[in-house]
Image (spheres, rainbow, N blue to C red):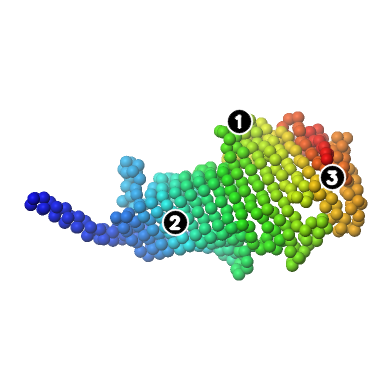
Amino acid sequence: MRKGLVAALAVVLVAGAAVAAVPLVERHAAAAIKADLERDPALTVGSVEVGLLDRKVVLKALRFRRAGELTVGRVEASGLAWPLAELVEGRTPFAGLDLGDPMQARHLALRDLGLSDENGRWTVGSVAIDDFHLERYEPLRAPDQLTHLLARVAAALSIGRLEQKDTAFAQLSTGDRVTVASLVIERFVRGEVGAMAMTGLAFTPKPPRDPVFGLADFRLTDLDLRRVAKAIGSAGWRPGLPVGRIDLGSASLSGFSGEAFTRYGISLGSITQQSQPDGKDVRHARLQVEGFVLDPPSSNREGLQIRIVLQAMGLKQLKLASDCAGTEDRAKGEVSIDRCAVGGPDLGEVSLSLKIVQADAPFWRAIDEGNTFALLGSKAGVGGAKLVVADRGLVERAVKAIAATSGRSAAEVRAAFAQEVRRFQPPGILITEELGKLLDTVARFIERGGNLAVEVRPESPIGLDKAPYFARPGPDLVNLLGLSATLSR
């Protein structure tokens, strides 16, 4: 019993001594971190706190001055850990963290951020990050390559969730401001974003003017920036060079506002985009614009001018919507605009379809790398296209508007317009009987209305190698493009 009691007392005494030593160790670690950070003469830290038991470090009043100024009121990192893979390789964090070193933290919190340079000043109220994991990466040491460094960090970074509040940028030369109330990013994994939501975006000219543009809500899912991070992170990349294709699963924008809308009486419901894979090689995409209404006020000159034009067309307000769908099929070597339509209930609809065929490896490489010049090495070309104008009042209202402003009757305007179309002779183009028939079909559409369809059906795909032919005098566009026009009711 006595031996057991002595052993128990010994354990208590050792534990007590260890606990009593914790504050001393924490103060020593805080002083070491502060000294290590301030070895760089451009960096100062007001104070450093260390919590060993919860693996926490707090930096206060951080200031970094080099080609501008970065200030952070408070940085707190808790749940810090050193990756096991680094220990296996014999690397430890005790020599001081440096660019390229990994970092893991259960939670990061920053408050009162400011960044100033010759262009303006960024301010951020707060940033909170959960599950921060930065893998080891190879930094570029040149001080003027911050963009490359950020791209390499993005390619090595994973976070569970980031929430940023009260972000603002003020341009130094003009005083213009851009503000964002909230930004949330979820499931960021080495350049891939699972979801992002932004609220309260506003662009305001030099205060105290009202915002010119505002967006209440912007959301997206499945954003892939890996190609961009790889391109910008390379040592040879410079601004203006290709950055690669950005893939996006879905996006939606709603809550449009601002002086740019109210001045002209514009309202816009939403803009949405979806992209859906169908197997390995096929992807379908759709873009919709809904709820566009033009109802100009008569209280300002711009609005009054537009209102007069609408009244001449017999419209109180203009309503439009757009719906575009396309398909990318790498197995077939095709990219198509299946149907892209713009229309309104009082006007009709204009739709376009187009197909690019013979999309080969150079074509896809140019698309993926974002390098338009690389398309010169591709055999891909336009295989066909179709433009359809379905008149549901568009021609009649346009004729009325021209008649009201020219002092002529609607019948005179219609006849004169149709005659000009029939007489049209584009310069440098071979005038053939087939071209005359096509123009006559367009003229009859102006006279009678209906559904006008203009098609392009070339015998062989029209690629970039056909460009010199278009530049020569007198090309026969009707035969080369396979042009035709039909009119139906």
Crowd around label 3: few <14 · some 14–19 · many ≥20 (10 Å): many
Residue type of the residue flagged with mark 1: Ala
Q: Quadrant of the C terminus?
A: top right
Determine whether, in the image, residue 6 is placed left or right of residue 439: left
Local secondary structure at mark 1:
loop
Q: In this figure, which residue is indicated by the disc labeled 1?
A: 331
Whether residue 427 appears in this view of the structure is no
Residue 482 versus residue 352: which sits nearer the camera? 352
Q: Residue reaching furthest bottom?
A: 208
**In the image, what residue occupies the spot 91% across and 56% down?**
408
Q: Amino acid at mark 3?
A: Gly
Using a 10 Å C-alpha cutoff, classify the residue at mark 2 as few (fewer than 14 neighbours), some (14 to 19) or many (20 or more): some
Q: In the image, is residue 284 above or below residue 310?
A: above
User: Residue 29: percent from the left, percent from the top?
Assistant: 29, 58
Distance from the alpha carbon under mark 2 to that under mark 3: 60 Å
In this figure, which residue is indicated by the disc labeled 2?
Answer: 128
Disc 3, SS: loop
Q: Which residue is mark 3?
A: 449
Instruction: State the CA–CA distance, disc 2 to disc 1.
Output: 44 Å
Mark 1 Cα-neighbour bin, 10 Å: few <14, some 14–19, many ≥20:
few
Observer-nearest of 146 and 205: 205
Residue type (three-letter) at the residue carrying disc 2: Ala
In percent of the image, x 78 and y 51: which residue is there? 346
Mark drawn on residue 3: none
